[in-house]
Amino acid sequence: MGEAATRVLAALHGVAQGSGGNQWRALCPAHDDHSPSLSVTAIEGAVLVHCHAGCAIDDVVEAIGMTKADLYDNHVGADYNYWDGGSLLRTVHRREAWQRSESKRFTQTVHDKSHIPLYHVDAVRTQVERGEIVMVVEGEKDVHAAEAMGWVATTSPMGASNWRKVDSSPLTGARVVVCGDQDKAGARFVKDVVASLAPITKELWVAAPAEDCHDLADHIAAGKDWADLRLSQAPPVVSQAATGRPDKSGPSVVTLSEVERQYVEWLWPRYLPAGKLVVFDGDPSVGKSTLTLDLAARCSTGEPWPDGAPNGVARDVLLLSAEDGLADTIVARLDAARADRSRIHALRAVIGTGSHNDGQPEPPSLPQDIPTLERVITERKVKLVIVDVLMAYLGGRVDSHRDQDVRRVLHRLAEVAERTGAVFILIRHLNKDGGGTAMYRGGGSIGIIGAARAAYLVARHPDDNERRVLVQVKSNLGPEPPALAYRLTESPEHGCARIEWEAEPLPGLRANDLLRTATTADGPNHTQTQQFILDHLIAHGGSAKAREVFEAGKEDGFTEHALKRARSTCKEPKITTQKVGYGDKSYQVWSIASQHGDTHKAADAP
């Protein structure tokens, strides 16, 4: 830890170690802070600070008797050396202002005029040789912030306007993500970088920091990660720059009379729309994975679909399977389904795109590995992608129960589906809210099924426990197809189960029919959600704080919304609520009502 970080941390109160070895949280000195809202991140030669309540950096450092110059190890600024091999070619000097009325200043010392290298160009060359992502950012401070996260980044010396002077040839054949500052100069920087790199790079993406951050250093100081970057493909920007057409900012409006009508294309007519996201929900015991591998087999061979619809064309399939082994499970199921395994591929690992990746293979993660996923789909000409299960592939910073998080990921996945024409089947387990309708029973946010163009439930038939049913929950693209029944039968020669479809469909059967809550002669049969609440309250003497119920429920897969709904509908025994305390210190207590109608005292709550 540098002297700047030591100095700043010593002046703060309520300091606690963050998730990384170079990150801390502290009470912000610029406002009346009762819970640590100030992020402190140590980078090479400096320290980054960010108040999540919105305080300006100037106000934060002034409150502890410092200036922004104190955020650097030498109290003034930083010297950034541009090496190429063993030669020092130039040094950029950054000098921070001592007062608000002043601004930072940059000067440079040129040691060798032979050429202007990229910053940390040796690390860039190594990264390109390994086929891993290089970030191009607007300034050396952003480079060091990226390196504190384990990423490889570079920039050009002396500001955004000098990119075209730098020797960018080491980025030939590279996978590049460009991230500029959120201002006019940053927009020009991104445009210049994209225009110069488009002809020479293998992949080119544009990233923006989180909405409340000015640059990548702010993004990282705020505790944001790779998954929080707003990524988009660069080709549309490249085509404009390459053709020399002027930049026309402002709204893009299309008159619909000028739009040519396009018809929905189908991989499996009425069931799997081409180029769209499709969700399959079901409990682990119903054979979702076996079912989707049966569809993969039919896709690989061109055999007719389960309802008898003609297929005829063999297509390639990509599997992302987090729960089953390739050799001992998936291959056996594919052989039992008579698949052409030369057309079925599995994406098991990705190297070099994780925020702390050290060159070792890591499981694919969404959204950060979406560019790699699209590359595989395009190169292999894949037309069916099976993600089993979706939650296993969401990045650590993506909350599957937060609508905004999942919609951001699935929007980008839907764009890949549309560009490639591939169907994405996203498999989910059912949540434990036994009283919900089929639309709300899939795990995670309702935004997942909202982003899909079709969704299906896989469940046991209500009148035959050995019979399974595939039934549609949602479709935005056509009339509802009939439910289809199947059974899991043994395939002794392969040592696994296989799917045996029934010839006749089940018209009139709906998804909610498969989720009917059973009742018993002894009284009401609580849903799993209600039973969880009762078990939790009983374990805590009959009464507990509502927020503790929510926290415990989240660990077991119950959403806060489902818990509230289950509490309000639980009749025997009734679960009451009571507000305890006043103002900001108040909280809600849930209690089990006794047979006499009274409740456990809120004071007994933990």
Image (cartoon, helix red, strand yellow):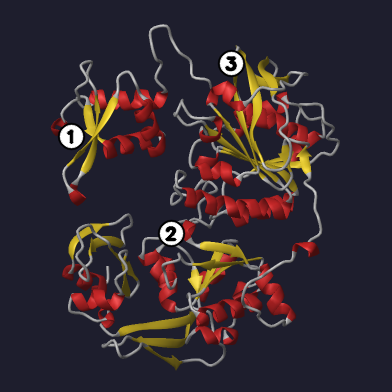
**Measured along the vertical axis of the image, is residue 585 above or below residue 593?**
below
Q: Is residue 225 above or below residue 247?
A: above
Q: Residue at x 32, y 27 (%)?
A: 533
Q: Callout 3: few (<14), some (14-19), or many (20+) C-alpha neighbours within 10 Å? A: some
Density class for disc 2 (Cα within 10 Å; few <14, some 14-19, many ≥20) is many
Mark 2 to mark 1 CA distance (whole Å): 35 Å
Residue 296's x, y, as percent? 71, 34
Left or right placement of residue 600 versus residue 379 in this view: left
User: The N terminus appears in which quarter of the rendering?
Assistant: bottom left
Q: Answer yes or no: is residue 420 visible.
A: yes
Residue 462 numbered tag: 3
Look at mark 1 in the image and give the residue it sits on. Answer: 606
Q: Which mark is residue 225?
A: 2
In front: label 2 or label 1 = 1
Label 2 vs label 3, nearer the camera:
3
Cα distance, mark 1 to mark 3?
42 Å
| Side (left or right) of 304 relative to 406 | right
Residue 433's spot in the image, x, y percent? 44, 29
Q: Indicate whether 209 appears above or below 481.
A: below
Is residue 17 shown left or right of residue 151?
A: left
Q: Is residue 199 visible?
A: no
- Report the quarter where the C terminus lies: top left
Q: Earlier in the sequence, mark 2 or mark 1?
A: 2
Q: Amino acid at mark 2?
A: Asp
State the residue at coordinates (73%, 39%). 478
Type of amino acid at the residue the image marks with label 1: Pro
Callout 3 amino acid: Pro
Residue 570 is marked as none
Q: Quadrant of residue 306?
A: top right
